[in-house]
């Protein structure tokens, strides 16, 4: 049966599509590049000479050396990026007229430093600089694109690859499949990312513009196609129907190539779409999410049409502050085209939001000024200075209007300098602003020319004021369902408290009512006799959740019924739970000062505090990814409810849900708020009820998953973990083990729901506190089954060698502290050896077979997982010997491959002839003969690749060329047997290549 091949199905079609997008194909056989940076000096000097006509060659070569030095920094390429986008001096890229730059595409460009190497499938060059690459996999590949992400993480953490990481701006990972929106991980589809020294973040791209209509692809050139196919020794696939299908611009890989690398888009991403962000754990590099891209473009279109106000509705967690930052950069250049100087403001209505916005803008490199009073704001708005910092950095002023006094005289236009273009980003505009009294609303009178861009994560619920008359129509929208599908936010699960605790709380409530009377409900709920059992439940639930979800670092927030209840919660916590090692913080406006509260919030984000007790603070605008349990002690109204609920919807590690524990029964209020949400959607888009009903996971979905858990685990002993492990170990069917693993993964996420929905039979049979351990046991067994299958199947050597076996081998290892360094060295040596073996393309070579068998022998003997120091040292020695030998073998193969124009087929034929012996003592003559055969065969196949399908006919066609090249031209003695042997080797290689591409 024919095998599928990622080169013919994805890589070569993508290269040809990029050629049609205006990227000239560059053959590495003829090109010269600097292996230290992978910059192509000839292209670099020529291209920069075109966009810098006054610069001479010597100056441009010095610039190349300066770039090389910048790339050595451990800064994720920040210094290089700043130089790349610099507006003065010698330009690396012409952003004003992007078409003047030189665009190339290459394949298998080696990123090499001594023994370490990787080769991206496709590299994108701009002016000779490799600024982007594409990694492809064939559809339905094992582990999807996650396999490539894991490999990239390992490579990016390797300091030997630092220069290659630092020069790369964008990456695409694709297995040429449509997105599976129900998958918790990006497995199927085409994703884009920027670089990271840790985990690269994969982003979906859903194009909102009809590029198929607006982007004019260059005509498909048969000569260009032949050149690419010949250069990659794949002429055999030219007429394959599968290849013709995959060349279409509508495939997932080709679509995302258009979306990212169409010249105007690529210019936009390079110039505005990247940000360096200083986080607590170090410097990160972020790329614009696609809704931010299209919101930015929509803002520009509205401004060009003369619109001065509008609303960006992007759901919570979608990065609205980041959107404002990106637009500061983009709009600065937009206005500069008309010699206008913009001045940017970010308006908030609470001090904590000011502090958060200030921190986020500063982390992205903006100079930030803050204003907290009406008088300071009045002075600022009268100033004609757009930039107040001495360094000339991009600047934004964050204004907190919380304590501003209404002033009907504030709006005299004569008081203001109207020569400055003020741009106001108004945060959280779903909160009603009074146009009659609000200081903010009077901005219209104060500066009629000001641009007002409202930002909200929830719709403008309510009828108190006509919000759109203040802020304008929607400019761009991005809803919950899209954010969840794109993996930027999580679905929520609402948990009712357990029935037995309801009884305990009701009993406590009755006792307090008897003691203090039933009139003052707030006093009742703040009484210690009520707070104590409520807090006991919260702490017990948080501990159970951490165990069952396998996430000991998740944090919690309790939204209390009153500030008095919050204070009582904190007091009871310190008395009963603080000695156990848990930590808490009380966040109220009248407790402590703002600096103390700020420090507590930062400590919670950093994982130093387990639980927060709040009343009104932190319900909106508070972002802490580890916050995954929200305990609602009171009903919150309308848009504030949606804001509060989505405090737990940020992505965190591999969690699939955020959890809302409902003490107050918010169902009625949530239903009303949800209806208002849908009404707003319907007013904008028509009937969207079905699409936007999935903020919370439905009861029907939950019940079905619980039924699946029951059915899948029915036959297993769930009370005795050891017996369960034995039962799992007896299963040799990988699909069955995969199903059990998926079931346990679901159970891990749904354990509280089992309790909530009354499925006590499941609770009795399955200890959810053991769920993570059981899941790990099943995962371990599945990994071992995969390893065993690979080891026993000699035809799957490449699969074996491409699997991260070092992770499987050491899964059960427990080493002492003093042995950790040695164990890491052993794992790293195994990885290098495995990758070197995987790179070998002649796996019938007796030397390769011998080295592979030696590695397998170490696996099968389980010697590698022995962790005493003596054995580890011995294993490191054994692996180093294998590594050195395979390196030499690969080096010899690469030398021979270069002789055949990088055609691996003829390397294998050449080696088989040498191994056979008796033909000639001169390898040079064998090479010259095979080179002639190759030219004849490639021409035949290029004209009609289907000829290979008829093996006998192809062999008869090739035989005259074999005889002519070997006997007539090289004077090598042939007999019929030797002639058939050579001809069979050649034709079989072409046949295998054809099958692999079919």
Image: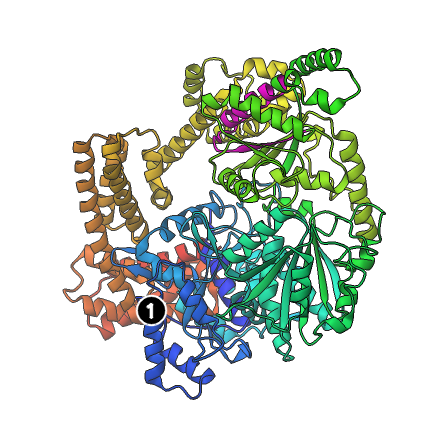
Q: State whether residue 258 is above or below residue 457.
A: below
552 inside magenta stretch: yes
Nearer-the-camera pick, 696 or 662: 662
**Taking 31 as reference, is 525 left or right?**
right
Nearer-the-camera pick, 877 or 405: 405
Please tell me which residue is depicted at 75% across the width and 48% down the height of the picture.
Answer: 431
* Count of numbered tags: 1
**Taking 482 as reference, is 851 left or right?**
left
| The furthest residue to the left | 921
**Taking 455 as reference, is 732 left or right?**
left
Residue 341 spot, x, y in % from top left: 62, 75
- Residue 305 in sight here: no
At numbered mark 1, what does the secondary structure look like: helix, strand or loop? helix
**Quadrant hosting residue 956:** bottom left
- Residue 502 in sight here: yes
Nearer-the-camera pick, 365 or 968: 365
Residue 823 spot, x, y in % from top left: 26, 37
Q: Magenta segment range? A: 533-560
Q: Which residue is mark 1?
A: 68
Residue 353 spot, x, y in % from top left: 62, 49
């Amino acid at each position: 049966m024919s095998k599928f091949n990622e080169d013919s199905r994805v890589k070569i079609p993508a290269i040809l599509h990029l050629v049609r997008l205006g990227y000239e194909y560059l053959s590495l056989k003829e090109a010269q590049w600097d292996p230290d940076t992978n910059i192509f000096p000839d292209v670099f000097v020529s291209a920069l000479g075109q966009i810098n006509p006054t610069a001479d060659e010597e100056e441009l070569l010095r610039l190349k050396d300066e770039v090389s030095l910048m790339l050595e920094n451990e800064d994720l390429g920040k210094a290089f990026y700043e130089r790349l986008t610099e507006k003065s001096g010698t330009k690396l890229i012409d952003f004003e007229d992007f078409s003047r730059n030189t665009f190339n595409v290459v394949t298998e460009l080696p990123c090499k430093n001594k023994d370490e190497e990787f080769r991206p499938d496709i590299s994108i060059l701009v002016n000779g600089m490799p600024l982007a690459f594409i990694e492809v996999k064939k559809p339905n590949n094992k582990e999807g694109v996650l396999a490539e992400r894991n490999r990239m993480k390992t490579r990016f953490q390797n300091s030997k690859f630092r220069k290659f990481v630092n020069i790369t701006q964008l990456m695409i990972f694709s297995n040429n499949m449509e997105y599976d929106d129900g998958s918790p991980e990006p497995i199927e589809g085409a994703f884009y990312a920027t670089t990271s020294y840790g985990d690269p973040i994969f982003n979906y791209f859903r194009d909102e513009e009809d590029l198929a209509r607006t982007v004019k692809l260059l005509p498909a050139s048969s000569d260009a196609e032949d050149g690419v196919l010949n250069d990659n020794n794949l002429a055999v696939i030219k007429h394959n129907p599968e290849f013709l299908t995959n060349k279409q611009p509508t495939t997932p890989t080709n679509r995302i190539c258009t979306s990212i690398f169409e010249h105007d888009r690529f210019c936009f991403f390079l110039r505005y779409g990247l940000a360096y962000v200083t986080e607590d754990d170090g410097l990160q590099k972020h790329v614009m999410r696609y809704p931010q891209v299209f919101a930015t473009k929509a803002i520009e279109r509205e401004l060009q049409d003369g619109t001065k106000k509008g609303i960006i509705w992007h759901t919570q967690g979608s990065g609205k502050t980041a959107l404002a930052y990106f637009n500061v950069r983009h709009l600065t250049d937009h206005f500069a085209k008309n010699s206008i100087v913009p001045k940017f403001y970010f308006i908030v209505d609470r001090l904590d939001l000011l502090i958060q916005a200030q921190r986020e803008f500063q982390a992205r490199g903006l100079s930030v000024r803050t204003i907290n009073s009406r008088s300071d704001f009045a002075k600022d708005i009268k100033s004609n200075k757009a930039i107040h910092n001495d360094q000339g950095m991009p600047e934004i002023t964050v204004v907190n209007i919380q304590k501003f006094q209404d002033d009907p005289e504030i709006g005299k236009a004569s008081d203001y300098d109207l020569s400055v273009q003020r741009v106001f980003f108004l945060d959280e505009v779903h909160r009603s602003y009074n146009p009659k009294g609000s200081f903010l609303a009077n901005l219209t009178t104060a500066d009629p020319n000001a641009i007002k861009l409202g930002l909200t994560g929830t719709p403008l619920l309510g009828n108190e004021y006509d919000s759109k008359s203040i802020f304008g129509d929607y400019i761009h929208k991005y809803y919950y369902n899209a954010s969840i599908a794109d993996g930027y936010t999580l679905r929520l699960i609402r948990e009712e408290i357990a029935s037995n605790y309801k009884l305990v709380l009701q009993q406590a409530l009755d006792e307090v009512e008897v003691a203090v009377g039933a009139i003052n409900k707030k006093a009742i709920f703040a009484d210690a006799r009520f707070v104590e059992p409520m807090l006991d439940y919260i702490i017990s639930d948080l501990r159970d959740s951490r165990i069952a979800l396998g996430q000991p670092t998740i944090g919690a927030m309790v939204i209390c019924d009153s500030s008095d209840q919050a204070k009582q919660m904190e007091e009871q916590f310190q008395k009963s739970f603080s000695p156990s090692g848990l930590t808490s913080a009380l966040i109220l406006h009248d407790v402590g000062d703002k600096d103390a509260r700020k420090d507590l919030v930062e400590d919670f984000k950093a994982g130093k505090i387990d639980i927060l007790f709040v009343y009104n603070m932190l319900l909106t605008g508070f972002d802490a990814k580890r916050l995954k349990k929200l305990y609602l002690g009171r009903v919150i109204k309308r848009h504030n409810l949606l804001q509060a609920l989505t405090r737990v919807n940020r992505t965190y590690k591999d969690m699939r849900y955020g959890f809302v524990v409902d003490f107050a029964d918010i169902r009625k209020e949530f239903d009303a708020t949800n209806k208002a949400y849908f009404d707003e959607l319907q007013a904008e888009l028509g009937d969207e009820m079905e699409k936007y009903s999935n903020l919370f996971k439905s009861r029907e979905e939950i019940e079905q998953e619980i039924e699946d858990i029951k059915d899948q685990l029915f036959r297993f002993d769930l009370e005795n973990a050891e017996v369960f492990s034995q039962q799992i170990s007896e299963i040799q069917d990988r699909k069955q083990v995969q199903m059990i693993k998926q079931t346990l993964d679901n159970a891990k996420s749904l354990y509280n729901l089992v309790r909530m929905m009354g499925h006590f039979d499941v609770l009795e049979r399955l200890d959810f506190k053991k769920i993570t351990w059981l899941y790990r046991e099943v995962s371990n067994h599945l990994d071992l089954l995969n390893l065993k299958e690979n080891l026993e199947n000699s035809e799957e050597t490449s699969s074996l060698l491409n699997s991260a076996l070092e992770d499987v081998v050491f899964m059960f290892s427990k080493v002492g502290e003093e042995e950790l360094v040695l164990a890491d060295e052993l794992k790293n040596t195994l990885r290098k050896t495995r990758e070197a073996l995987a790179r070998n393309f002649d796996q019938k070579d007796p030397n390769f077979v011998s080295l592979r068998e030696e590695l397998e022998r170490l696996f099968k003997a389980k010697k590698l997982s022995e962790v005493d120091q003596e054995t580890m040292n011995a294993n490191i020695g054994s692996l180093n010997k294998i590594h050195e030998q395979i390196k030499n073998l690969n080096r010899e193969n690469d030398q021979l491959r270069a002789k055949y124009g990088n055609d691996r087929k003829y390397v294998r034929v050449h080696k088989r002839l040498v191994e056979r012996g008796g033909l000639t003592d001169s390898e040079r003559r064998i090479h010259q003969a095979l080179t002639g055969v190759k030219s004849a065969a490639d021409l035949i196949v290029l004209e009609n690749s289907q000829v290979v399908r008829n093996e006998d006919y192809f062999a008869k066609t090739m035989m005259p060329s074999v005889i002519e090249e070997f006997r007539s031209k090289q004077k090598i003695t042939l007999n019929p047997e030797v002639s058939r042997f050579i001809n069979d080797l050649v034709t079989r290689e072409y046949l295998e290549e054809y099958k692999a591409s079919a």
